[in-house]
Amino acid sequence: MADNSLSGTRSFRRQITAADGTNIIEILKCSDIFNEFSSLESSYFIGRSFYLEALSGATYLPSKKEAPFPQTFPEMNAAEKIAALLEVEKKYPFIGLRLHARKGSGAWQALATSLLQNRGRETTIPLVIPYLTVNQIKLLSPDDSLGVSIVNYGHGTLMSGDYINLEGDFRFSLDLIEKPKARAIGVAQPYGIDVSTAVRFRTANPNRALLYVTNAGESRVWLAGTASGLAVGSGIFLSPGGGSLSLTDAPMLTGELWAIAENGTSRLAGMEASYA
């Protein structure tokens, strides 16, 4: 499950004119959207999701002979309505707006083609449904790109004054899972202190990585994490002449440490290292 998530919505626009010819024109590159978050990859595993929610084309083709809208009536069935549409397409010139997709820098693959005619005015057509998907939203991979091209079916291509204004809306999200952190440990520093009555021999160090302490004296020593918890016969016992303790992963590791000798004076010595 993700520790954190980021999301956003964006839009894009591209006008297609005669200057574009029949070349494939990239209109959307999903990876560009995620590039601004690439700095997070050093600290997180990132799950990327991309949703194309709308894509439409406002078409104006004054260079082509004007085609009427097909005559359809409520009593017609689906086949009859399609036949009426095809009849108009046969009698009047049209061009194709072909949609393409590719993965990364791979080859473009044609997805679908919409046939466009001059309707006497600017006409807007939806492209997500039915040309890209039958669902309400087209799911895309983070490395997907979409492109379009104009297809000549024998009636020419876009001419001066013709245009197709493409506009799309999309949504993206990132799921962030924090990576385990490998922390470097700095050089260990030696220390030594004489202990008789209660003394704090190590101050708190939230960055402490390891601590080693040995009783190099001749009196038994008792250790505790607080002054109030320190007493002879209670806490952590270090025997004289070499009794030792290593702390590497415990609540006491980063806190302060206190010591008291049972009789007379003893000597605590050791090494301490912090994370670099």
Image (tube, grey):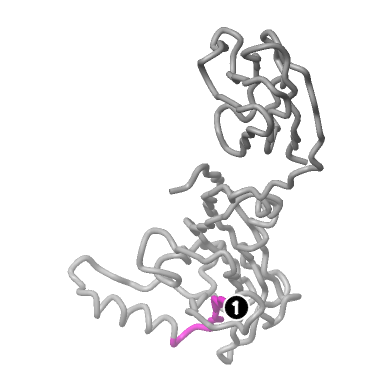
Decide which of 133, 196 is in the foreground and name it.
196
Decide which of 236, 42 is in the foreground and name it.
236
- Residue 134 is left or right of residue 73, and the answer is right
- The image shows residue 117, relative to residue 204, as above or below, that is below
Decide which of 130, 110 is in the foreground and name it.
110
SS type, badge 1: loop
- Residue 185 is left or right of residue 115, and the answer is right
- Could you tell me the amino acid type at mark 1? Lys
Is 97 inside the magenta-drawn segment? yes
Residue at 79% from the left image edge and 42% from the top image edge: 186
- Quadrant position of residue 150: bottom right
- Position in image of residue 272 (x %, y %): 74, 34
- The image shows residue 46, relative to residue 255, as above or below, that is below
Is 197 inside the magenta-drawn segment? no
Which span of residues is magenta-colored? 90-101
- Quadrant position of residue 250: top right
| The C terminus sits in image quarter | top right
- Position in image of residue 230 (x %, y %): 57, 12
- Position in image of residue 49 (x %, y %): 50, 57
- The image shows residue 22, relative to residue 207, as above or below, that is below
Give the residue pinned by disc 1.
64
Instruction: Say whether residue 97 is visible.
Output: no
Decide which of 191, 226 is in the foreground and name it.
191
- Quadrant position of residue 6: top right
- The image shows residue 155, relative to residue 179, as above or below, that is below
